[in-house]
Image (cartoon, grey):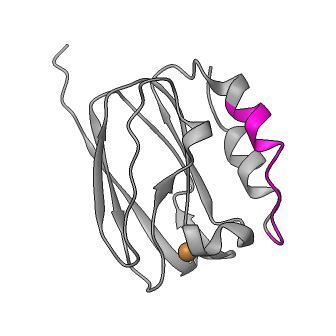
Amino acid sequence: MLFVAEEHEIKMLNFSESEPMVFEPGFLRIEPGDTVIFKPVDLAHNTETISTMIPDGGQEWLGNINEEVRVTLTTEGVYVYQCTPHLILGMVGVIQVGKPSNLNEVIEASSNMTFAVNSERLSNYLGQVIQ
Ligand SMILES: [Cu+2]
């Protein structure tokens, strides 16, 4: 079978259908070598990896506010990222790249995080990871 790398878009939004301050989709599963593009659809958001919640050797990224970010993920694992100004509002997202070898470490690290609102969001996303 021929492997073709794909591109996936994640929108940075003030509102999705039912949730405020949200990445859409907030959980994304891709194959190693695929590219993710973060689209600043609404203003005042960014995307930044949480360094304790990515796989060993995984790519980190840090976007400016309102900046479109394009990242190709080749290292397998679970990546958690945030919108820095809205982290306290639970504006986080999860990308699963191939096998989720670091899932337990990420779940453990997530237990140290506190959010003012949308506090179930991160655990909901992590619950969608497929072993
Ligand atoms: Cu934001």
x and y, in percent, of residue 31 in the image: 36, 29
Does the magenta segment cover residue 115?
yes
x and y, in percent, of residue 57 in the image: 42, 25
Identify the residue shown where x is 66% and y is 66%: 87
Q: Is residue 33 left or right of residue 63?
A: left
Q: How many marks?
A: 0
Identify the residue shown where x is 39% and y is 79%: 41
Magenta segment: 106-117
Residue 18 against residue 24 in the figure, above or below: below
Residue 71 against residue 14 in the figure, above or below: above
Between 54 and 99, the one lying in front of the other is: 54
Identify the residue shown where x is 37% and y is 71%: 64
Residue at the top extreme, as displayed: 1
x and y, in percent, of residue 63 in the image: 37, 64
Identify the residue shown where x is 74% and y is 37%: 109
Ligand 1 is found in the corner quadrant, namely: bottom right
Q: Residue 43, located in which quarter of the rendered image?
A: bottom left
Q: Residue 33, located in which quarter of the rendered image?
A: top left
